[in-house]
Image (spheres, rainbow, N blue to C red):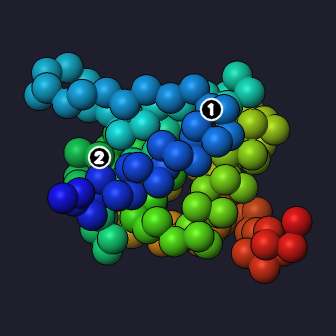
Amino acid sequence: MATPEKKVKDAIKKLLFDMDCWFYMPVPSGYGEATLDFLCSYKGRAFAIEAKAPGKILSPRQAVTVQKMFSHGVPCNVIDSVSEDCMMCLRAWILMVGEGNFIDNKALVDPPPIHHDMYATRGKITDKFFGGIITDIEKIKDE
């Protein structure tokens, strides 16, 4: 029986395969630098995704990892739902990354402070990830 987090990971994997994204899922061993569940590339642009069981938030160590990656220009997202809306938002986010909207650090907001809820999108695209760009989910559905 699949755990709630595994169901989220499976939904993310399916989306990444469907979008023809390269991705790697590191196997945690307790050695070396911490990382997130998915290290990905789309159209030559790197990004990372952390999968969580519904309602769960980043651990302090994961929050530090997101902070480090973000400060080096690597967009990160936290997904805790397999809903159609959440997967649609993740797809839109990946498309934005692929268009280079995150390449220039000057286009990014200052890296957010380490605060767990800031990174959990709960299936919504927020200005916390997009430097002030807020996308209306109804608009995405229409496209």
Q: Secondary structure at mark 1?
A: loop
In this rendering, is residue 136 above or below 82?
below
Q: In the rendered image, which quarter contains the N terminus?
A: bottom left
Residue 125, quarter of the rendered image: bottom right
Residue 99, given in percent of the width and then of the height, sits at 81, 38
Q: Looking at this view, is 1 or 131 the one in front?
A: 1
Residue 43, given in percent of the width and then of the height, sits at 74, 27
In the image: residue 26, left or right of residue 135: left
Q: Looking at this view, is 7 or 123 the one in front?
A: 7
Residue that mark 1 sits on = 21
Residue 73, quarter of the rendered image: top right
In this rendering, is residue 75 above or below 123?
above
Residue that mark 2 sits on = 62
Q: Spot the residue most to the left.
A: 30
Q: Spot the residue most to the right.
A: 143
Residue 61, given in percent of the width and then of the height, sits at 23, 45
Q: Is residue 96 at all visible to an observer of this figure?
A: yes
- Name the residue: 88% across, 65% down: 143
Amino acid on which disc 2 is placed: Gln
Q: Secondary structure at mark 2?
A: helix
Amino acid on which disc 1 is placed: Cys
Q: Which numbered disc flags the more N-terminal residue, 2 or 1?
A: 1
- Name the residue: 29% across, 46% down: 62
- Name the residue: 39% across, 69% down: 117
For disc 1, the neighbor class at 10 Å (few under 14, some 14 to 19, many from 20) is some
